Each structure stands twice: as C-alpha cells, then as structure tokens.
C-alpha cells in the first residue's frame, strides 16, 4: 500500500484532490453540472482506510446516468430535483473496478442534440480548444476526459453521442453492441437505440472500461485479437460516409487510408448508400415512436413525481421541446403513430441484415470512415447550421451522418483520433459486426498503432 501523501492523505484521496484541482483549472469548459467534491473525497477516504493496494481512479458520468445521491437532470429543468437512490448498473460495475465518481457532466438537453449547447447549464467547451463546441450529446464527459480532469468517462449514445464528441475532442470512444451494457438507471430516448458508452484518452483504458462493465477479458474466445501478422481487411465506403468532407477531415482521412494501405491492410470497396437510406427511414422514427412510452415508464418507475408532458413542457431548448412534444402526443396527424413505428422497426431489421450481409460477403474486419465529416465549430454560433464546402448545412444531420446508421443497427463502433497537423481533432470510426466488440477493440488497437508509427519505425509524438 502506498503511504499517505500531503496532510496525511492516502493515494485515493491524492487522486481525487488532483482531479478537483484540474477541474477548477478547467472550469471554463463548463464540463460538469454537478461536481461532487465532498462525496468523492469521502469515498476516497473510505478506500484509503480499507487499503489493499487497489488503484483508484476518477470517473465522470453523463448527467442522464444515475449516480446514487447526485442529481440526475438529463440536462433539463424538469428533472433538476430528481436524485436517484442507487447507481446505474454500469456505474456500479466501474465503481467495483476502482472508479470514484467525481461528478455528473453537462450534456445536450435530454440527449437530443449534437453540440452540448445547453441553455440551462451553459454550453460545453471543447477539451482541445475551449472556443469550440464539444459536440454532443455527451459533450461534458468528452471535455472532462480530453482536458485530463478525469481518467475516464461514461456517456450515452443514441445516434452518435459517444462517437461524435470523442472525435471532436480527440479522444477514444466506444459505442457497444446494443444490449451489451445494462440500460437500467439511464434516462431514455429510444429503448432500441440507447446505450451507455465509455470514453478515455487511451485505447488500452477504453478496452479496460469495457472489460470492467462486461466482465470480459481482451483475451479468450469472446474477444480474441487478430494475429499481429494477419493482414487486416477494411471496408472502404463507396457512398456518403467518405463524401463531402471538410478539408481537414478529408486530409486526415486520406492520409489514414494511404498509411493503412501500406501497412499490411487491404481496402475493400463496399456499397454503403443503402445503409444510409434504411437509416433515414428508421432512425428518428424509432426515437419519436419509442420516447413517450419509455419516458413514462422511467418517470413512474423511479417515482420522479412528474409526467412526460410536464418535463417536455419545461424543456429550455425550443428545438428539443418541439420535437419531443410531437413524440409525446398520444394521437394526431403529427404523431408518427403505431404504423410508422412498426415500419421503422422493419426498416431497422433490413438495415441489420444489410450490414450482416456486407460483413459476410466481403470478410472485412471493420468498416472505416471519418466519425464526423466536419471539425468542431465555435461555441454558440452553429446550433442550427454550419458552413461546409461553401454552403450552409443543418448541424444535426451533418454531425450524425456517419454515426447514425450503425447506431440504428445496434452495431459496435470505436472512434480513434487521427493524427492531424494544425487543425482541430478528427476522428476515425471503425464499425464492426454485431457482438464483435472485443474483436473490434483489438482491430482498433492495431489501427491506432499503425497510424501513429512513423515511416521506418518510431512513434509519433
């Protein structure tokens, strides 16, 4: 056991004190809604008294994932008074592995957005450049991890809310296969599409977080890594995912394609336009069709004391409120209706079948693309639209363009930061077959090592 530090503090208390100092120095990022200095300090003291030598580390948790005794606002005024009594299972698993929760992180209201520009709790600054937005909806977690406040973080992902902020902040993120992580204790949008997901500054830690949550090792049958001398096969999208990229993203992507193509990897062109078409007919309709029933059950089950209509009516973001009022309508021409939901479920099944056929037919280890076609933009200025290649495009569909299809299909995806030269961060997305999360993490590790190796050996700085 490591001996006590300053003022008799043990190693866990030292870790928390250092994290709180970093949080104070990075307060301008507005990454946290609730910073639990007292609770984290008390938990660290308990660990130090028990001893045992286990390393304790600090965790940031998105404010729609329950942490016992801390408010769970989901970024919206209507839930500001809700304090869960128990941890979500995904939080409990990480606590058992040594995590100390430092606080609850800022987010796009009710997880329905891509910038984390929250009108109640303020916009989240990017961990790589505070003048830029962090992306969303898990922007606070990404900023807290990227800026080094915490060792790791938890977000949630419905259509890209882990991958997008991970890419824009220059860190690693995992959206697991749908249903692989427990969803209890998470404020819902779409039961079909929602999942918690981890973020970290290194791929090793990301893989460790996944193992802590699932109890699965990187070694063994469920997650055997491809042999290091085996040639990797990557799906190269022919349509949409690699088109209309902002210049820094295009440069980083093309450099990655070239480097991987000369490093024992084979690029296999794959048709992907139909994946986007299936997603357009399924993705948002699943959210609109599933939200009201899921949210009703959540509020009643946790005895929040408010109904769905009350929470939606109190929403501070007009775009979020308008969309969810439509979703919460019990009937009427604006409501997608049971028939539309059934249609969306059928389109999702077709999307899943199309992905499965693509992986089987081409034998690829992963489908690669930029995670987001653009870099992060200045705070407060691009909530509705942003410039891309000489025209103004809508922000939300642009940022989720590459992440939403695989998310709707429930497939695992990993975001890896690409080497860049003088631009904001750019992310590389790897999508794997359903249930292949550990294999995908192992492939991502190979990719990450290849991208950061200089020609002739050596690592990039």
Image (spheres, helix red, strand yellow):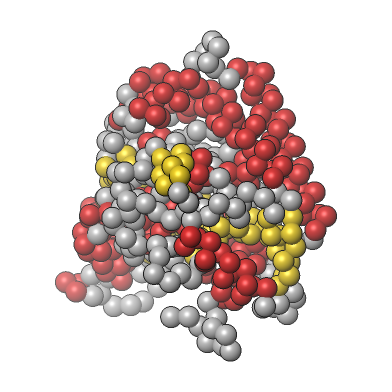
Q: Quadrant of residue 168?
A: bottom left
Q: Quadrant of residue 28?
A: bottom left
For the point 73% across and 47% down, the residue is 355
For the point 53% across and 77% down, the residue is 452
Viewed as shown, does residue 210 lie left or right of 1? Answer: right
Q: Quadrant of the C terminus?
A: bottom left
Q: Quadrant of the N terminus?
A: bottom left
Is residue 54 among what the camera can see?
Answer: no
Q: Nearer the viewer, residue 291 or 326?
A: 326
For the point 44% across and 42% down, the residue is 392
Image coords of residue 62 (percent x, y)? 39, 46
Q: Is residue 42 above or below residue 456?
A: above
Viewed as shown, does residue 365 lie left or right of 320? Answer: right
Q: Is residue 177 above or below residue 253?
A: above
Q: Is residue 177 above or below residue 259?
A: above
How many numbered badges does the structure rendering display?
0
Return the residue found at the far right. Answer: 361
Q: Nearer the viewer, residue 169 or 180?
A: 169
Is residue 319 among what the camera can see?
Answer: yes
For the point 71% across and 60% down, the residue is 235
Image coords of residue 70 (percent x, y)? 32, 42
Q: Nearer the viewer, residue 31 or 220?
A: 31
């Amino acid at each position: 056991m490591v001996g006590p530090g300053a003022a008799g503090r043990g190693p866990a208390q030292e870790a928390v004190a250092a994290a709180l100092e970093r949080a104070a120095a990075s307060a301008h990022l507005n990454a946290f809604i609730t910073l639990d200095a007292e609770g984290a300090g008390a938990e660290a003291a308990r660990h130090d008294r028990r001893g045992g030598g286990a390393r304790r580390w600090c965790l940031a948790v998105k404010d729609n994932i329950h942490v016992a005794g801390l408010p769970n606002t989901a970024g919206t005024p209507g839930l500001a008074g809700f304090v869960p009594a128990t941890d979500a299972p995904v939080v409990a698993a990480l606590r058992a592995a040594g995590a100390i929760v430092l606080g609850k992180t800022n987010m796009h209201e009710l997880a329905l957005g891509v910038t984390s520009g929250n009108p109640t709790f303020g916009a989240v600054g990017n961990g790589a450049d505070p003048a830029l937005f962090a992306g969303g909806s898990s922007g606070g977690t990404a900023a807290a991890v990227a800026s080094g406040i915490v060792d790791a973080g938890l977000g949630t992902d419905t259509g890209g809310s882990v991958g997008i902020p991970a890419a824009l902040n220059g860190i690693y993120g995992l959206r697991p296969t749908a249903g692989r992580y427990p969803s209890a204790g998470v404020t819902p949008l779409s039961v079909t599409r929602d999942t918690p997901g981890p973020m970290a500054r290194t791929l090793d830690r990301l893989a460790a977080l996944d193992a802590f949550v699932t109890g699965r090792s990187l070694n063994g049958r469920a997650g055997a890594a491809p042999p290091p001398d085996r040639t990797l096969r990557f799906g190269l999208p022919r349509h949409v995912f690699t088109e209309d990229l902002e210049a820094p993203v295009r440069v980083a992507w093309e450099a990655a394609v070239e480097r991987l193509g000369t490093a024992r990897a084979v690029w296999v062109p794959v048709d992907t336009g139909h994946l986007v078409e299936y997603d357009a007919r399924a993705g948002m309709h699943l959210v609109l069709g599933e939200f009201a029933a899921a949210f009703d059950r959540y509020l009643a089950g946790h005895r929040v004391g408010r109904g769905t209509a009350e929470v939606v009516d109190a929403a501070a973001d007009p775009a979020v409120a308008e969309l969810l009022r439509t979703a919460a309508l019990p009937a009427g021409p604006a409501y997608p209706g049971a028939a539309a939901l059934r249609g969306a479920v059928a389109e999702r099944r077709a999307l899943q079948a199309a992905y499965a056929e693509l992986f089987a037919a081409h034998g690829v280890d992963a489908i690669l693309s930029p995670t987001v076609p653009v870099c992060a933009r200045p705070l407060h200025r691009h909530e509705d639209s942003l410039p891309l290649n000489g025209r103004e495009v809508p922000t939300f569909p642009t940022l989720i363009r590459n992440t939403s299809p695989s998310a709707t299909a429930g497939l695992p995806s990993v975001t890896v930061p690409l080497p860049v030269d003088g631009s904001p961060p750019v992310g590389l997305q790897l999508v794997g077959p359903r249930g292949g999360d550990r294999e995908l993490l192992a492939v991502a590790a190979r990719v990450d090592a290849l991208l950061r190796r200089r020609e002739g050996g050596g690592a990039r700085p």
